[in-house]
Amino acid sequence: DTAVSQTPKYLVTQMGNDKSIKCEQNLGHDTMYWYKQDSKKFLKIMFSYNNKELIINETVPNRFSPKSPDKAHLNLHINSLELGDSAVYFCASSEGYGTYSYEQYFGPGTRLTVT
Amino acid sequence: GDSVTQMEGPVTLSEEAFLTINCTYTATGYPSLFWYVQYPGEGLQLLLKATKADDKGSNKGFEATYRKETTSFHLEKGSVQVSDSAVYFCALISFNKFYFGSGTKLNVKP
């Protein structure tokens, strides 16, 4: 009965490869997010989708492509992986978005290591 | 632009000590403020929140008061436990975007 789940938990791959991370939420939320956390624990938003529509797209290389097949899923595909992509990627969801204090629920994270 | 600044860690305390983690923010408009906690190997969990000036958020013995005049949202706990060891993130939401501070690692020794 996990609220926000991500797969895989660990991902080790070589430079130049293409990989995907999957995220699913069973909370019935409308909005989902991808965050990147670097080695210093700094957390930065990458993308946000509301009802399958992209609403936030931060300055992220176009090698990163999110896809939301339905409200409950937001996947992240990364092409031509680089060493600097090594980080922990967190998926999150919230009931809605806006200036209201919508709590975000985070997944357990996917630790990506590019060698 | 909007941002959150937290005190750098790590913060190391003995059990039952008083905890303060400073957080200040810069925002246009009227943001809501949050503290999230990240235990080792886990995702972030909401600890407490405040939605307007002078609101006090509290949970599990932690408290923070939304101070508009000083643009601060400092986290406090009167008596920390070893189980409080984690990374704490201050955050705000403004115009649909969440902004997180850099995180403060807390180590509590028995």
Image: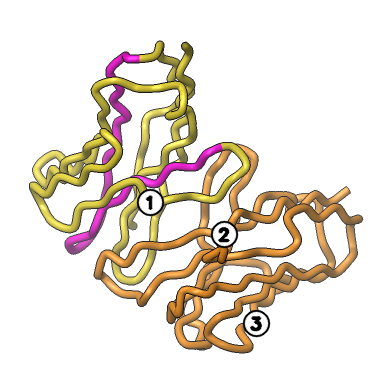
Chain colours: A orange, B yellow
The residue identified by callout 1 is: B46
For mark 1, name the chain: B
The residue identified by callout 2 is: A107
Give the x, y percent position of residue B100.
Answer: 41, 50
Q: CA distance from mark 2 to mark 3?
A: 17 Å
Residue A38 in magenta stretch: no
Q: Is residue A100 toward the left or the right of residue B41 in the image?
A: left
| Residue bounds of the magenta highlight | B16-39
The amino acid type of the residue labelled 1 equals Leu
For mark 2, name the chain: A
Cβ–Cβ below 8 Å for labels 2 and 3?
A: no
The residue identified by callout 3 is: A67
Q: Nearer the viewer, mark 3 or mark 1?
A: 1
Sort mark 3 into few (<14), some (14-19) or many (20+) by Cα contacts within 10 Å. some
SS of the residue under disc 3: strand
SS of the residue under disc 2: loop
The amino acid type of the residue labelled 2 equals Gly
Give the x, y percent position of residue B7.
Answer: 37, 29
**Which residue is more in the foreground, A82 or B77?**
B77
Q: Is residue B15 toward the left or the right of residue A59 in the image?
A: left
Please name the residue shown 88% across and 48% down the image. Answer: A115
Q: CA distance from mark 2 to mark 1?
A: 12 Å
Cβ–Cβ below 8 Å for labels 3 and 1?
A: no
